[in-house]
Image (cartoon, rainbow, N blue to C red):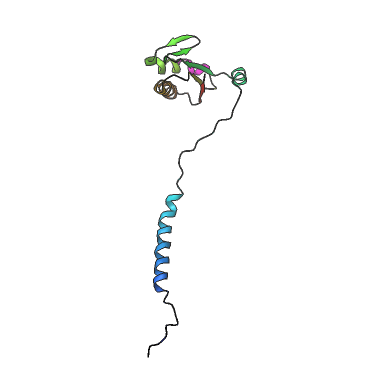
């Protein structure tokens, strides 16, 4: 006669759980890495900002001309311009870019400002 099977063998189940535990222990430290730390800007009325602070105001037109106080700046000399005039504007730089201006021009202005020591750079549409 055949003996009846009364108990379940849980050894294979235990092996599976141990393998899953090891996988989770290896993956868990990788999930803790952080990405970019971004500071989300607050919505502020532009006129209020310009009244209370000393910010250098640069405009980029739809034809990708870089303007400061109405006069055009050469993109090749932007770094020298920011190094020379940046000390007079301790609160940083505000770039007002036209909606149709090219992204490359905006990045070029931002890079030139950063390379010349300006650390606070804001971007505005307009």
Q: Main secondary structure of the magenta part?
A: helix
Report the span colored magenta: 84-88
Question: Is 70 displayed left or right of 76 in the figure?
Answer: right
The one of 46 and 93 positioned closer to us in this rendering: 46
Furthest toward the top, the residue is 71
Question: Is 61 displayed left or right of 40 in the figure?
Answer: left
Image location of residue 88, percent across then percent down: 52, 16
Indicate whether 21 appears above or below 104.
below
Image location of residue 83, percent across then percent down: 44, 18
Residue under the point 49% across and 16% down: 58
The one of 44 and 32 positioned closer to us in this rendering: 44
Indicate whether 112 appears above or below 71.
below
Residue under the point 61% across and 22% down: 45
Q: Quadrant of residue 49?
A: top right
Residue under the point 61% across and 18% down: 47
Image location of residue 17, percent across then percent down: 43, 66
- Is residue 39 located in the magenta-colored stretch of the structure? no
């Amino acid at each position: 006669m055949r003996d009846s099977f009364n108990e379940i063998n849980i050894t294979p189940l235990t092996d599976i759980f141990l393998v899953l535990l090891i996988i989770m222990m290896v993956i868990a430290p990788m999930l803790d890495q952080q990405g970019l730390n971004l500071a989300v800007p607050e919505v502020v009325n532009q006129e209020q900002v310009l009244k209370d602070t000393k910010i250098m105001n640069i405009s980029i037109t739809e034809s990708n001309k870089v303007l400061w106080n109405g006069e055009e700046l050469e993109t090749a000399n932007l770094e020298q311009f920011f190094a020379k005039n940046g000390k007079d504007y301790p609160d940083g730089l505000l770039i007002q870019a036209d909606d149709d201006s090219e992204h490359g021009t905006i990045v070029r202005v931002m890079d030139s400002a950063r390379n010349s020591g300006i650390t606070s750079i804001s971007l505005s549409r307009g």
